[in-house]
Image (cartoon, helix red, strand yellow):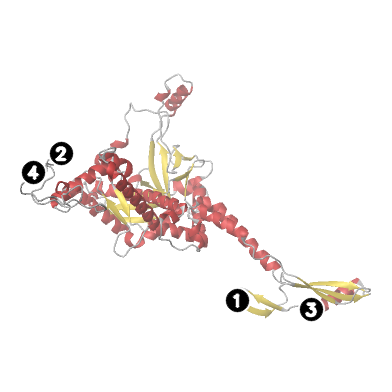
Amino acid sequence: MARLFGFSIDNNEDKLSKSAVSPVPPNNEDGVDHYMSSGFFGSYVDIEGVYKTEFDLIKRYREMSLHPEVDTAIEDIVNEAIVSDQNNSPIEIELSNLNVSDGIKKTIREEFKHILDMLDFQKKSHEIYRNWYVDGRLYYHKIIDLKKPEEGIQELRYIDPMKMRYVRQQKKKEKDKYDQLVTKNMLMDEDPMAYNFPEIEEYFIYNPKTTGTGNPMQTNTTRGIRIAKDSIAYCTSGLVDRNKGTTLSYIHKSIKALNQLRMIEDSLVIYRLSRAPERRIFYIDVGNLPKVKAEQYLRDVMMRYRNKLVYDASTGEIRDDKKFMSMLEDFWLPRREGGRGTEITTLPGGQNLGEITDIEYFKKKLYRSLNVPPSRMDGEGGFNLGRSSEILRDELKFTKFVGRLRKRFSAMFNDMLRTQLLLKNVITPEDWELMSEHIQYDFLYDNHFSELKEAELMNERLSLVETAQPYVGKYYSQDYVRRKILRQTDMEILEQDKLIEAEIKSGIIPDPATIDPATGQPLDAGQNPASMDLGAPVMEPEIDASSAEPIEMPKGGEI
């Protein structure tokens, strides 16, 4: 445990200046397990048993994913987020906002394609995304040649989340000095901002033989392999249980709904099996026989007339086996002298066995907990490509949810790309801090609902621009129309102006100076509206009265 396995990249940018102080410790937003330093092995701090709980959670998530309704919902989400196409890759890197040279952009694209090839993302994208969504976390080991690190990542190897833990450990300090500092700050003898937080080191613990049982401390600390943080590419769901500090999956909130649905379905099956068939009641006349003989006589009659055939559900066979008693047995009751003799009556089966209103309620509750629109799961509604007004609000919410998932999942590619570029000396850690914000990932899109919504919004805006056109230059400016009606941002306005200017120069679109604003038709050669004196009054030509013929006036009623 003295040294870490793997490699680490030093980055001085993450370290704050000594003058930048805060009384609040760093946030734990990724569900990382905490250790405190105590001797060689460390002492386990978490009271709730995060390790055991985390193992059980992942196991439960995987069991839940096998349930038909949950599996359908997960598949719907994965199919929406990862679109498989024969010709196009499910994800592309977008560098249009990155302000670097074309050579560096080309290198970044090549390295990103190399990462996708190592993941075999073209073929395994569906499985990779599904594993991340179900487990709530994803780990990959970045294997490099330690003798030749400049060659970059050699292999990306998947690690089972059950065998991997991300740990923050406090570095050992002089105890007396540390306690004195804490005591002073608690007594307010010194400035609270002078509080010195303990130094934390971060690493991963990999245990290939973990089973989720036994002492969490022994299972995960003493027998695991410590791996450096930069050697592992990891991505979590972003959902953290604030009470326990455990990373959760997106299907965590559907645990209760699924259990309720299971119980209701099981109880419905049992009720139908027990109440569906009709039962018979046999009243056997035993006369004045003593109790023992009456019981013997009743058993003889019962064995003579009872159903002796038994159905074996496991093999599908019907056999004569009297050792098994069916829960659908008939009733045999003795009747004394003075009764009506031997009689057979029939009990009716259960009524209203087709009532499944409660089942439908819990199904919808389960679908809502899985963030999938219930209209998709029912299978009744057809696919609509009409007006966007016919699109349900649930579909738009679902689209936004998938977009958030994609953004979260892209953090894994960011980590892999950073390591690859730094190892190959393409950029420095300082450069990456500036560039990472402008590197986007474009997923292949297949949501027709949002496309319809965007198309209709654009159509409405263009119609409004057409209506406002006569008032441009009189009551509104061009800038106002672009900002308020077309909703263009400053970046979009600058970008569109550049593109329009470039297309005019290249001859793709005509120059507005050569177009008549009234008719929209191109002007004649040599006729330039800029050189024309449009404001000068039009002079009528003089008419020679001697040579002119008398003007014939229109008759009444004529125009």
Measured in 3D between alpha carbons, the distance from the residue under mark 1 to the one under mark 3, in whole angstroms, is: 26 Å
Q: Are marks 4 and 1 in contact (CB under 8 Å)?
A: no
Residue 177 falls in image quadrant = top left
Residue highlighted by disc 3: 303
Q: Position of residue 305 (x, y in %)?
A: 78, 80
Q: Is residue 80 above or below residue 200?
A: below
Q: Which of pointers 4 and 1 indicates the residue nearer the eye?
A: 4
Q: Which of pointers 2 and 3 indicates the residue nearer the eye?
A: 2
Q: Is residue 199 above or below residue 241?
A: above
Which amino acid is tagged 2?
A: Gly
Measured in 3D between alpha carbons, the distance from the residue under mark 1 to the one under mark 2, in whole angstroms, is: 100 Å
> Residue pushed farthest top?
189
Residue 121 seen in render: yes
Q: Position of residue 393 (x, y in %)?
A: 46, 52
Residue highlighted by disc 2: 535
Residue highlighted by disc 4: 542
Q: Position of residue 118 (x, y in %)?
A: 30, 58
Label placed on residue 315: 1
